[in-house]
Amino acid sequence: MEEKWTTVLKPHTKWNNINLKELFSYKDLIFLFVKRNYVTKYKQTILGPLWLVISPILTTLMFVVVFGNIAGLSTDGTPQMAFYMAGNVVWAYFSSCVNQTSNTFVNNASMFGKVYFPRMVVPISTVLTGLLDFLVQFVLLLLILLFYTISGVKIAVNIWVLSVPLLLLQLALLGMGVGIIVSSLTTKYRDLTILVTFGVQLWMYASPVVYSITQIPEKYRFIYLLNPVSPIITMFRYAFLGTGYPPLLSWGISWITTLVVIVIGVLLFSRIEKTFMDTV
């Protein structure tokens, strides 16, 4: 009898070998990697997942003390804790996507060399892991807003909250795009592994995480908003606090930048995965 195979593996010769249908068929493996990421992240820790709550609270308190009280930066009349938490929650998710996906090839080289599966499974699972972290911290932000509302402080939540899923999708695509570009380049240039952490820290200060967009002089504001993360944070903060304004034109440009970055990242990732075992 003629043998029939369920899966046939062939060498890829196209410039783009990303197969979305095949990728979807490995959805169970994606969720398995998400579970693995959580287990390894909090293994042998005393507080475990509680760090998801403790970390943003400590970071936000530090922002309140340093930038709110010592530096005296304006929060546009909104409570400092809510203002800094809103920026920190968004930035934490983006930076996590970039930092974690930037090590995809280096950290998983031994596994990639032993078994076949679509390599894009790993960065996608990393982004989903970060999304779960974001949801926990987002609930914390909502509790802070609820506390201020009960205390009689006016919190200007508005219709723009409906844009949050779109903002999260953009953050995920942008973070993964930047991360897999760095990951592809680090197979040859290990210096990028060191530079990426430093670069992400500088990127944070070039984004309105610890200050309002209104602190930027109006004549330079459009140039400042060319940073694709700046419109996202500004939109998110405006949706929940009413501070600043929705920079729609800059947000549209940010989406174009995001799509360009993710396309370049996927193409470069697809090209490097064929030969990276020879260089890692």
Image (cartoon, helix red, strand yellow):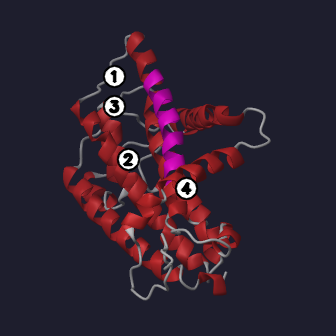
Q: Position of residue 243 (x, y in %)?
A: 31, 35
Distance, label 3 to label 1, CA atoms, is 7 Å
46 relative to 1 in the view: left or right? right
Nearest to the eye among marks 4 and 2: give it.
4
Which of 25/135 is in front?
25
Q: Which residues are magenta?
A: 126-143
- Which residue is identified by label 3? 240
Which of 203/71 is in front?
203
* Residue density around tag 3, few if under 14, some if 14–19, many if 20 or more, within 10 Å: many
157 relative to 55 in the view: left or right? left
Relative vertical location of residue 200 with respect to residue 15 in this rendering, above or below? above
- Which residue is identified by label 1? 155
Whether the residues at callouts 3 and 1 have beta carbons within 8 Å, the answer is: yes
Give the main secondary structure, helix, strand or loop, of the magenta stretch.
helix
- Which residue is identified by label 2? 168
Task: Report the amino acid beneath label 3.
Answer: Phe
Residue at image position (56%, 71%) is 183
The answer to which of marks 3 and 1 sits earlier in the sequence is 1
Which of 222/18 is in front?
18
Q: Position of residue 79 (x, y in %)?
A: 43, 25
Residue at image position (39%, 86%) is 14
Nearest to the eye among marks 4 and 3: give it.
4
- Which residue is identified by label 4? 29
Q: Is residue 142 magenta?
A: yes
Q: Position of residue 260 (x, y in %)?
A: 32, 70
Distance, label 1 to label 2, CA atoms, is 22 Å
The answer to which of marks 4 and 2 sits earlier in the sequence is 4
Distance, label 4 to label 3, CA atoms, is 35 Å
Q: Is residue 213 visible?
A: no
Q: Mark 4: which secondary structure?
A: helix
